[in-house]
């Protein structure tokens, strides 16, 4: 086996060549996952990926309860024209084009490139402001249109980074009826059996809250961007659970699920003024993302409140105009690129199942990837905002 290219791609090339040389009889059992792993000295993940790709390409076929077999010439020709192999194109529909989304997309692009799959990209966000807020209804409409276009283009599969809210159920029903595999990234649809790859958002809320509590901040206010998506709800659940675990009260004014970045500048400043002017003001702001961090820092400075001398900031993900950590005391680092890579891997698995005549939605799975919490002390440069002079 050669030494260039990804391992699983080199395995595929070698196995494909062996089939072409008739080293495996059509209809005969193929090399198993364990045999492949031992022969090429690779992990189970690499072995499964290689086999799934060859099934998706129609070179191999899977028979439930029997195993993997070499497809005969007729099966291969039929596979090339089957619904699961119409275009060789994956539709990728992503909401917004911030740094976090871009890194997820890089992972998706890399995963598709390794497999020789073409990628059709569509941005479902109609308008993204400087605070990272998009028009909700218009973005949902645009997302539904992109999903319909993917169906019309007869794509092999769909990777969707959803906008907040729920897509048109008729669109989802059509995708499922046609058995077009779909994998969600970053968030999921509650109650709908669709594969999803996400960060551990519950852990984001829980661990950041624990760090702030350990740093002496018992009153923590949350500032959100979107409010109608599972990533936000899971983070809020983690935040509240950490407060309960440390015997802290859940104060409605601090744990309200409201969109800070969607407010006008005057409304944001009034909200901060009300919070900081209360009898027990917060000493920390737990911000949804980098856009919320940057906006809060600017608003606080204009109100004459310095960060972190008078109040500290924490960021729940990397979406924003720059690295969060120099301005925040604690920040979550989400596995954005890994989310994209794992989404492609899951989609290829579902495409292979569909090729074998199975329903790719029969056993939807949520893959949850770990997050990393970074602290202010871990970076060489730390920023402080210069507060404007109070009147």
Image: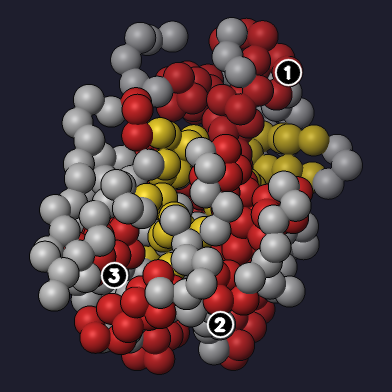
Q: Earlier in the sequence, mark 1 or mark 2?
A: 1
Quadrant of the image containing the C terminus = bottom left
Q: Secondary structure at mark 1?
A: helix
Residue with the mark numbered 3: 132
- Measure the C-alpha gap from mark 1 to mark 2: 41 Å
Identify the residue shown where x is 52% and y is 49%.
Answer: 217
- Measure the C-alpha gap from mark 1 to mark 3: 47 Å
Q: Position of residue 250 (x, y in %)?
A: 68, 66
Callout 3 environment at 10 Å: few (<14), some (14 to 19), or many (20+)? many
**CB of mark 2 within 8 Å of CB of mark 3?**
no
Is 63 above or below relative to 350? Answer: above
**CB of mark 1 within 8 Å of CB of mark 3?**
no
Q: Is residue 161 left or right of residue 327?
A: right
Depth order, front residue of 357/98: 98
Residue with the mark numbered 1: 34
Identify the residue shown where x is 42% and y is 41%.
Answer: 330
Q: Given this view, does label 1 or label 2 mark the residue nearer the observer?
A: 2
Residue with the mark numbered 2: 166
């Amino acid at each position: 086996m050669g030494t260039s290219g990804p391992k699983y791609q080199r395995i595929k090339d070698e196995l494909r060549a062996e089939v072409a040389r008739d080293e495996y009889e059509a209809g005969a059992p193929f090399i198993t996952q364990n045999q492949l792993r031992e022969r090429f000295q690779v992990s189970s993940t690499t072995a499964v990926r290689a086999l799934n790709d060859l099934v998706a390409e129609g070179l191999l076929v899977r028979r439930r309860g029997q195993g993997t077999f070499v497809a005969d010439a007729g099966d291969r020709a039929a596979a090339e024209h089957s619904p699961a192999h119409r275009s060789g194109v994956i539709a990728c529909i992503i909401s917004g084009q911030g740094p976090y989304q871009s890194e997820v997309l890089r992972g998706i692009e890399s995963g598709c490139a390794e497999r020789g799959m073409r990628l059709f990209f569509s941005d479902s966000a109609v308008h993204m402001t400087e605070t990272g807020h998009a028009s909700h209804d218009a973005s949902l409409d645009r997302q539904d249109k992109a999903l319909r276009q993917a169906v019309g283009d007869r794509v092999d599969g769909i990777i969707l980074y959803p906008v907040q809210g729920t897509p048109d159920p008729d669109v989802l029903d059509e995708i499922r009826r046609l058995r077009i595999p779909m994998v969600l990234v970053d968030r999921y649809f509650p109650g709908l059996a669709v594969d999803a790859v996400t960060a551990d958002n519950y852990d984001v809320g829980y661990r950041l809250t624990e760090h702030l509590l350990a740093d002496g901040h018992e009153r923590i206010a949350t500032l959100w961007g979107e409010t109608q998506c599972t990533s936000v709800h899971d983070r809020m659940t983690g935040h509240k659970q950490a407060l309960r675990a440390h015997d802290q009260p859940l104060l409605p004014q601090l744990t309200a699920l409201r969109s800070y970045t969607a407010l006008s500048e005057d409304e944001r400043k009034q909200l901060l003024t009300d919070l900081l002017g209360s009898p027990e003001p917060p000493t920390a702001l737990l911000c949804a993302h980098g856009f919320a961090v940057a906006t809060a820092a600017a608003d606080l400075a204009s109100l004459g409140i310095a960060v972190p001398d008078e109040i500290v900031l924490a960021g729940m993900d990397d979406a924003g105009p720059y690295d969060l950590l120099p301005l925040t005391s604690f920040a979550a680092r989400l596995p954005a690129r890994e989310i994209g890579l794992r989404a492609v891997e899951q989609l290829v698995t579902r495409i292979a199942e569909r090729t074998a005549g199975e329903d790719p939605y029969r056993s939807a799975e949520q893959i949850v990837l770990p997050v990393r919490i970074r602290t202010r002390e871990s970076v060489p440069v730390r920023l402080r905002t210069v507060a404007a002079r109070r009147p």
